[in-house]
Structures are given as C-alpha cells and as structure tokens.
Image (spheres, helix red, strand yellow):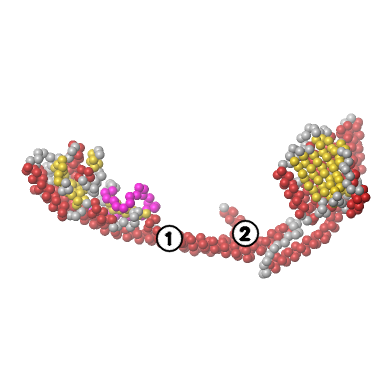
C-alpha cells in the first residue's frame, strides 16, 4: 500500500494536489477530533463528580435511617418487660399468654409509628412457634424447618444484627417475604440482649420498600440507568431503575459510594450513550464538517488539476502518440490562455511533421526497395541453382524420386523468386510459380490434399505483386490441411468484377474458424484499413499475431493503394476462404474491356 501511494504520488499530479490539500486539512481535523473527545472526557468527569456527590448524600441518608432503625431494634430487644413476657409464656395459649402477646403487639406498634421507614415489626416466640407481627397480629409457623430457621438465626446472630431480603429462601418453596408478609429487606436480631441465657426469640424489623426507594429514586439520571444498594457480599438489597442483564464497563458509566456506617455500597450505572447524547450530535456535526472538507478538497484539487495539470497531461499524451508514429495526432482544446497557445502550437507542429513525412515517404520507399534489391544481389543465384541441381542429380542416382522432385520444384521456385529483381508477375506466372511451392507441400504431406485452379482468361494477364499469394496459401495448408489424412482440397481462383477489380480467392476444406476468432481477424483487418499508409510498415513490425495476413494487406496497400482489400470468410467444419481484391490500373482496364466482359472460370485444373 505504501509503495502504491508513493508511486501514485510521484506519477500523478492530481493525486499529489489532493494529498497537499488533505495535509492542509489534517491539523484542523486532528484538532476538531481532539476537541470532541476532550469535551466527552470533561463531560464524563463532571457527570461522575455530580453522581458521587448525589450518591454520598443518599448514602448518608440511608445510613441515618438504618442507624435509627438499629437503635429502635436495640430498645425493643433489650426491653425487660417484653422479654419477661416472652420468657414466662410457654407453648400453651392460655388467656394470660394471649394478654401478654397483645401487650407485646401494642409495644411493637408504638415503635412502628415512631419511624416512617419501618413497615412492620415481628417477634418470633420460640416456645410457642408463634410469629407476632404488627401487620397481621400473629400466626403459627407451619413446618419444623421454618421454626428451625428462626431459632438458628437467633442463635447465630447473638447480640449482632443481620439483614435478609424478602426473596431469601427459608425452606424449599417458601421465602422470608412470604413468611413475614414483607417485600423489602428486614433487620434480624435476637431478643433479650443482656441475658446470656436468652431463649432463641428473634426480632424482625421490616423496612418500607417504597420509602427506601424514594430516597434514591430521585437520583436516577435517565430511564435506562439504575441504582442498587448491595451488601458486603455483593448481594443487591435494594434496586431502582431498569435492571441490566449484562454490565459492560466500556459502554456504561459506573459510580460506587461506600457507606461510612456499614460495609454496604450504593452504585449507579448509566449507559454512556445517554450521557453522550448531546455530545454525539456535536461529534456527528464535526464528522460531517470533516467529510465535507475532504470532499471540497477533492473538488478543489480536481478543479486545479483540470485547469493546470490536465492540459499538460493531454499534451504529453499527444506527444506520446506522435512519437509512436500516429501522425494524425490532434489535441483538442478550447482554452485561450497560455496552455491553449501551447497546445495549438503542438497541433501545428504535428501537422507540419505529417506533411513532411508524407512528402518524403515515396522517396523513403524507393530507398527501402533499393536496399532490398541490394541484399538480394548478395546471394549468388548461380551458386544456389548449381547446388540444388547437384542435390537433384544425387537424388536421381539413388532413385529418391520424391526428393528429386521436391528439389526440382524448390529450384524452380527460387529461380522465379529471384528472377532479375522483377516486382510483378502476371497471375498466370504467379500460379506457375505457386505450383512449385504447392508441389513441395504435397510431397511433404504425402499427397493428402489436392489443388484446383479456376483462373479466368481475362485475369491471366493481370500483373500481380511477387509472392503475394504465397503467405495466403501457406496459411491454408498449415491451418487447413494440417491433420488431414486424405480428401484435402485447395481451390485457387481468380476473375475480374464489373467494377474493374480483380479478385483472387484461396479456399480450403479444412476445419474452419470459430466465430470469435473470425471476428477478431476481421477487426484487425478493418483497423489496418483505417491506418495511414505510412503506418503500415510500423504496424507490421510491432505485432506478431496474424503476421502473414498483415504482411499481405500492408504490401497490397503500399503497392495498390487504399482500394486494395483483403477479406476472410470461414465456417466451422466446412473451411476457410481468403479473397484479395485489387483495383485494376487504367491500362489494365482497357485490356480487360477489349477482351470483353467476364468469362466463365476455366475448368478446374487439379494437381
């Protein structure tokens, strides 16, 4: 990624301009993000401080309530007259014991009226198994397990105090709240505090849940927050708000205050999303401004690029095309400034260069022709002919008829190819010359194909560029006859169209071509038709695919002009046909008219 960025930064002006604009905006973006995050931190810290203050006040209030209730419980548990009545009465319910329980109930009711946070006070009488309560009078506990729990609690507490929740399970299926008819926490302590031989009588002071909740309910900052009062074991004794099944410290604000009177804690949990509700809007606005700034940076960089860098890039592309030989290169522009003047100057220079090259192209073509003839003259024809003749007679002496025939045809082929530097042969001479090459190929392929000539009389005398048909025939043999064991057929025909055009066709009955391949070949030939004459030789040098067809078409265009055409027709499993269309010269048209129209094709000559 770093390498890609460096490459784009060094090779593209638009990318560089965009990077510069982003670098300018980067400090502002960082400062904005820092300010938003800092404001969130400040808001969080202030919320924690306010919550700690409120929770401390509520915790102090709760401490006073519990301290006051504990003092009341001490007075009740240490009351001599009440303890005497409990100790004197046994399991029988005599009128005297009923009066005693009534007196105890009256004293407990007076204590309830003293403190508004007490909902009821109950005393468990061990001897009778009776639970005396200010809420419902008195009731006999049903099971031994329930009685045993109260006795064990009184003995375990001693002179101490314990708290129990209403949902605490006393026995299977029975909670403490169900026994005492309480919905809140309750204070438990043994009666007869100052008597070491005390009976297991138990005092139960139940708190009013609504009154306790009113102390902390006003502290709730939102509907999704909660406040919980928990003991030293982490058990929640009192809770208000929306309970959270899963507490996530990174998503919730948690503030805990320890009691100065007891080991209890008061905890507030609030989702940070509610705390940051307003700052998140500011954060969204900041991100929107940052996104808009980046978008403006891209737009400005594009405008600057279009105004400065784009004309330079267009000019550079035009120069690149011109250097590749596209002499018709023209860079369009509507600008009137310095860049427009520069581009117009380049267009004028390209046009002048095109005219200079086209004016001197004919001279350059002649120089190339002279050079080719000079290279051909380096080959000693007599040495080549004598060598081939020697090979021929040696093959004759050893009765190698096929080799001698192949050498004889090769010798004749070279003799005509190097025939005094002639550039043109008549179609009839070209067919004779081509016949030597075809006979060599037939011997090579063991006569697995035959050749038919259908040459009209009017076309026999038409001059044809040397070796123009040989690449077409070679393609037909390689791609059409290769792999055939027999019944191969190659047809070479020529005739003159009324439009004063001579047509030469090479057909085979080979496997043909797929539609996609045929479409590609025709596209390439059409593309060559659109190119200027000066580009044909360069086109031939730079590509390797379809080399034979490109060579033939470029030579036809150079020699016969833009009117020369080459078309390819093919059907899968039926064969391929390549047709050369060559316009006749004025004198050739006159000779053709004198011979009178197009005659029927000559009877097929088989080889």
Membership of 101 in magenta stretch: no
Query: Which residue lies under the disc numbered 2?
Result: 12
Q: Secondary structure at mark 1?
A: helix
Residue extending furthest toward the right: 594
Whether residue 198 can be seen here: yes
Task: Report the quarter where the C terminus lies.
Answer: top right
Whether residue 543 can be seen here: no
Q: Position of residue 398 (x, y in %)?
A: 89, 30
Is 304 drawn above or below residue 489 in the view shown? below
Please name whichever residue, 541 or 293, is drawn nearer the observer in this view of the structure.
293
Residue extending furthest toward the bottom: 337
Image point 42% across, 59% down: which residue?
A: 280
In magenta, the rendered stretch is: 236-261
Query: Which residue lies under the disc numbered 1?
Result: 281
Taking 436 as reference, is 118 left or right?
Answer: left
Taking 215 as reference, is 525 left or right?
Answer: right
| Res. 365 image quadrant | bottom right
Taking 178 as reference, is 338 left or right?
Answer: right
Residue extending furthest toward the left: 96
Please name whichever residue, 99 or 228, is drawn nearer the observer in this view of the structure.
99
Q: Position of residue 578 (x, y in %)?
A: 79, 44
Image point 85% across, 44% down: which residue?
A: 494
Image point 84% across, 45% down: which residue?
A: 504
């Amino acid at each position: 990624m770093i390498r890609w960025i460096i490459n784009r930064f060094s090779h593209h002006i638009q990318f560089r301009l965009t990077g510069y604009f982003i670098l300018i905006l980067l400090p502002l973006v960082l400062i904005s993000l820092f300010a938003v995050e800092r404001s969130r931190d400040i808001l969080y810290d202030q919320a924690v401080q306010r919550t700690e203050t409120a929770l401390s006040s509520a915790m102090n209030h709760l401490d006073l309530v519990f301290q006051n209730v504990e003092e009341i419980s001490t007075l009740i548990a240490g009351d001599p007259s009440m303890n005497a009545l409990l100790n004197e009465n046994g399991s029988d319910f005599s009128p005297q014991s009923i009066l005693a329980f009534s007196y105890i109930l009256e004293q407990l009711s007076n204590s309830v009226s003293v403190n508004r946070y007490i909902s009821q006070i109950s005393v468990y009488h061990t001897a009778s198994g009776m639970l005396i309560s200010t809420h419902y009078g008195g009731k006999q506990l049903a099971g031994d397990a329930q009685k045993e729990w109260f006795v064990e609690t009184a003995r375990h507490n001693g002179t101490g105090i314990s708290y129990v929740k209403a949902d605490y399970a006393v026995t299977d299926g029975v909670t403490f709240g169900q026994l005492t008819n309480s919905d809140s926490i309750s204070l438990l302590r043994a009666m007869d505090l100052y008597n070491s031989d005390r009976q297991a009588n138990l005092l139960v002071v139940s708190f009013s849940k609504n009154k306790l909740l009113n102390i902390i309910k006003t502290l709730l900052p939102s509907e999704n927050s909660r406040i919980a009062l928990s003991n030293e074991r982490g058990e929640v004794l009192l809770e208000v708000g929306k309970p959270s099944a899963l507490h996530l410290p990174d998503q919730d604000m948690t503030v805990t205050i320890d009691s100065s009177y007891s080991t209890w804690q008061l905890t507030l949990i609030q989702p940070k999303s509610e705390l940051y509700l307003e700052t998140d809007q500011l954060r969204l606005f900041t991100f929107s401004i940052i996104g808009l700034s980046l978008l403006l940076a891209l737009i400005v960089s594009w405008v600057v690029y279009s105004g400065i860098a784009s004309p330079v890039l267009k000019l550079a592309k035009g120069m690149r095309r011109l250097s590749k030989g596209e002499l018709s290169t023209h860079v369009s522009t509507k600008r009137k400034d310095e860049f427009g003047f520069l581009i117009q100057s380049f267009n004028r220079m390209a046009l002048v260069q095109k005219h200079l090259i086209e004016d001197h192209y004919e001279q350059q073509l002649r120089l190339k022709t002279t050079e080719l003839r000079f290279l051909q003259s380096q080959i000693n024809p007599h040495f080549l002919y004598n060598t081939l003749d020697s090979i021929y007679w040696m093959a004759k002496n050893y009765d190698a008829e096929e080799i001698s025939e192949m050498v004889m045809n090769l010798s004749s082929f070279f003799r005509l190819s190097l025939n005094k530097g002639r550039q043109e042969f008549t179609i009839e001479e070209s067919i004779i010359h081509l016949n030597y090459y075809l006979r060599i190929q037939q011997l090579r392929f063991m006569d697995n194909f035959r050749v038919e000539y259908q040459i009209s009389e009017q076309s026999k005398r038409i001059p044809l560029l040397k070796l123009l048909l040989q690449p077409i025939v070679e393609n037909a043999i390689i791609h059409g006859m290769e792999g055939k064991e027999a019944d191969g057929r190659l047809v070479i025909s020529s005739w003159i169209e009324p439009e004063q055009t001579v047509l030469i066709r090479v057909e085979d009955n080979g496997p043909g071509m797929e539609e996609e391949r045929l479409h590609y070949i025709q596209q390439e030939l059409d593309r060559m038709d659109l190119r200027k004459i000066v580009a044909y030789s360069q086109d031939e040098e730079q590509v390797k695919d379809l080399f034979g067809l490109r060579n033939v078409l470029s030579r036809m265009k150079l020699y016969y002009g833009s009117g020369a055409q080459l078309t390819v027709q093919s059907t899968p499993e039926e064969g391929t046909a390549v047709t050369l269309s060559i316009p006749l010269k004025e004198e050739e048209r006159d000779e053709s008219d004198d011979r009178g129209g197009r005659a029927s094709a000559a009877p097929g000559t088989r080889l």
